Amino acid sequence: MKIALMDSGIGLLAAATAVRRLRPDADLVLSSDPATMPWGPRTPQDVTTLALAVARAAAAHRPDALIVACNTASVHALPALRAELEPALPVIGTVPAIKPAAAGGGPVAIWATPATTGSPYQRGLIGEFARSVEVTEVPCPGLADAVQNADEAGIDRAVAAAAALTPPDVRAVVLGCTHYEIVAERIRTAVQRPGLPPVVLHGSAGAVAAQALRRIGAEPAPSAESEASLTVLLSGSAGELPEAALAYAEGRLLAAVSPVR
């Protein structure tokens, strides 16, 4: 079994780790194009062009499924990716976990890139799944870039700025960019107010990993014997996990249990 994941940068680490935990025996292909990130401020046409190139590089390795581990690419490029690659290659997009966050009751905050915050796409999801709860959209300028570069001071500044815009009584925070899931615990600490119940964070990594297995008819097997490989593609060429990826637990886990081929 081989699962490919694509993103502009290392935001795919969370979903890749989720796949690895569900199926330690699955070979992974991680395809990204960090030289062109962030994709958020780019036009939909540019995002589609970039996403198609990254997806084609992954598809050349003949995976059984492709996870689009990027909210921006899922918003703008998913129809084009599916039109080109399906049905031969199932394509699984990433949707912000607004529905499960709202189901737990409000208030809810949605942390997202400035380009996504207030967008028709995000407002549509709020209208469909969260109209019965109070929702605050929180732009997080610079956070994805800081995570991508493992810029500790930049992460601290961006998280603190977003936390200051987050109402103190929120019960749930939706992580609307896959990069944010890598620093989820730092976000949790920043938004938790003394004396209030724990804030629940909602990411998408676990859901997309499970959906990828369902699309190919595979069952989770967390205890499977693993000699699975890890293929890293950077702008279409074979490479290694970026050094910044190893600053995070997810990157270290993938490097430790998956020899790069």
Image (cartoon, rainbow, N blue to C red):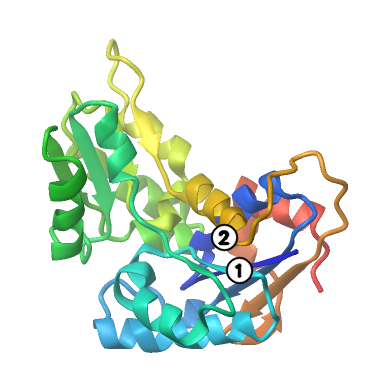
Of 248 and 53, nearer the camera is: 53
Residue 13 visible within the image:
no
Estimate how packed mark 2 is, as few (under 14), some (14 to 19) or many (20 or more) residues with alpha carbons within 10 Å. Answer: some
Does label 2 or label 1 sit earlier along the sequence?
1
Residue 83 falls in image quadrant: bottom left
Residue 143 % position (x, y): 35, 56
Residue 201 % position (x, y): 38, 35
Please say if the residues under marks 2 and 1 sit with CB atoms less than 8 Å apart.
yes
Residue highlighted by disc 2 = 215
Residue 185 % position (x, y): 46, 35
SS class, disc 1: strand
Estimate how packed mark 1 is, as few (under 14), some (14 to 19) or many (20 or more) residues with alpha carbons within 10 Å. Answer: many
Residue occupying image coordinates x 48% and y 63%: 69
Q: Quadrant of the C terminus?
A: bottom right
Residue 111 % position (x, y): 27, 48
Residue occupying image coordinates x 34% and y 81%: 47
Looking at the image, residue 18 lies above or below residue 66: above
